[in-house]
Image: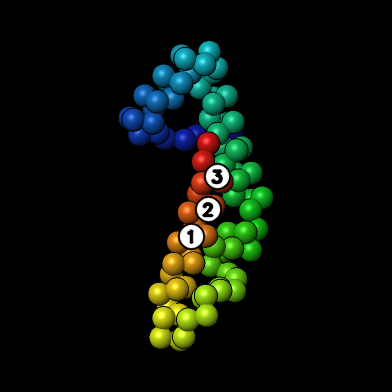
Amino acid sequence: MRSVRLDADTERLLAEASRTSGLHASEIIRTGTREKCDEILKTSLKDRLSYFIGAVAVDGTDARNSGREFSKSLLRSHDRKRRRNKP
């Protein structure tokens, strides 16, 4: 058994979610804790760092522009991932 202190805002949100859903607050806490633990533990280091890892195509530009092209490529990749993960 574990005891957890919640700030006033979180306590208010929990009470509201409990009333709205009809679930006990402890069930909401258990479910949320389990989901967060699963999210953290099921993600490999490679997956967490995938945004930073990989080869970059710079469209044939010379080395003077490679930093700028690399930045553009990272932004495009990030935007694609964000669009895919939108609910």
How many marks overall? 3
- Residue 78 is situated, as x and y percent measured from the top left of the image, at 49, 57
Would you identify the image quadrant in which residue 57 lies? bottom right
Q: At numbered mark 3, what does the secondary structure look like: helix, strand or loop?
A: helix
Local crowd size for mark 2, using a 10 Å CA cut-off: few (<14), some (14–19), many (≥20): few
- Residue 6 is situated, as x and y percent measured from the top left of the image, at 40, 33
Q: Residue flagged by tag 1: what amino acid is it? A: Arg
Of the pair 49 and 38, the residue shown nearer to us: 49
Instruction: Kindly check if marks 2 and 3 are in contact, taking CB atoms under 8 A apart as contact.
Output: no
Q: At numbered mark 1, what does the secondary structure look like: helix, strand or loop?
A: helix
Of the pair 84 and 13, the residue shown nearer to us: 84
- Residue 77 is situated, as x and y percent measured from the top left of the image, at 52, 60
For the N terminus, the image quarter is top right
Q: How far apart are marks 1 and 2 (CA)?
A: 6 Å
Which residue in the protein does label 3 denote? 85
Q: Earlier in the sequence, mark 2 or mark 3?
A: 2
- Seen as rendered, the residue at the extreme bottom is 63
Q: At numbered mark 2, what does the secondary structure look like: helix, strand or loop?
A: helix
Relative to 54, 86 lies left or right: left
Relative to 39, 73 lies left or right: left
Of the pair 6 and 42, the residue shown nearer to us: 42
Of the pair 81 and 47, the residue shown nearer to us: 81
Q: Residue flagged by tag 2: what amino acid is it? A: Arg
Which residue in the protein does label 1 denote? 76
Q: Residue flagged by tag 3: what amino acid is it? A: Asn
Between circles 3 and 1, the one closer to the viewer is 1
Instruction: Kindly check if marks 1 and 2 are in contact, taking CB atoms under 8 A apart as contact.
Output: yes
Residue in the picture at 59% in, 63% down:
50
Residue 7's place in the image compared with 23, above or below, is below
Which residue in the protein does label 2 denote? 80
Residue 83's place in the image compared with 49, above or below, is above
